[in-house]
Image: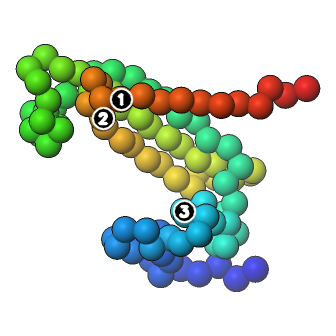
Amino acid sequence: MTRRRPERTPLLDPTPEQAGHGGGFAVLTVQGLEPDSMTETIHARTPTPHAAEVLRLSAGEAVMVLRRRTFTRDGRLVELARDIHAAARFAWSYTFTIPD
């Protein structure tokens, strides 16, 4: 499989929804970088002044930080994402299949 140069993929197009059906993981798979596992870490912290302004936080309100690292089967990091959310408006739900 021939890999395209990353800067020419829909992942780096700033236009919303340009990755197409299957999103970013589909684009990575086409590049030969199929996601196999991910690690997400979530923690609360005091917001930076900029985050407090952008998120329109009340005085004293915390933020939740979600950090996701996605890897291929051979351990190559192919995605690093960080999202910051107002704690009072944050919920995250996970569903896992229990292995045999």
Q: Do the residues labelled 2 and 3 touch (CB within 8 Å)?
A: no
Residue ID at (71%, 49%): 36
Give the Cα separation between the discs numbered 2 and 1.
Answer: 6 Å
* Residue 66, horizontal then vertical, whole percent: 41, 34
Q: Where is residue 88 in the image (x, y as percent from the top left)?
A: 27, 23
Q: Is mark 1 on a helix, strand or loop?
A: loop
Count residues near mark 3 (Cα–Cα under 10 Å), then give few for <14, some for 14-19, many for 20+: some
What is the distance, in whole Å, between disc 2 and disc 3 at their CAs?
A: 21 Å
Q: Do the residues labelled 1 and 3 touch (CB within 8 Å)?
A: no
- The relative height of residue 81 versus residue 86 in the rendered view (above or below) is below
Residue 96 occupies quadrant: top right
Q: Name the residue under label 1.
A: 90
For disc 2, the marked residue is 85
Residue 30 visible in image: yes
Give amino acid for label 3: Gly
Amino acid at the residue labelled 1:
Phe
Type of amino acid under label 2: His
1 up-or-down from 51: above or below: below
Q: Quadrant of residue 38?
A: top right
Q: Which residue is painted at 43% across and 47% down in the image?
A: 81
Q: Mark 3 points at which residue?
A: 24
Residue shown at the point (12%, 36%) measured from the top left: 56
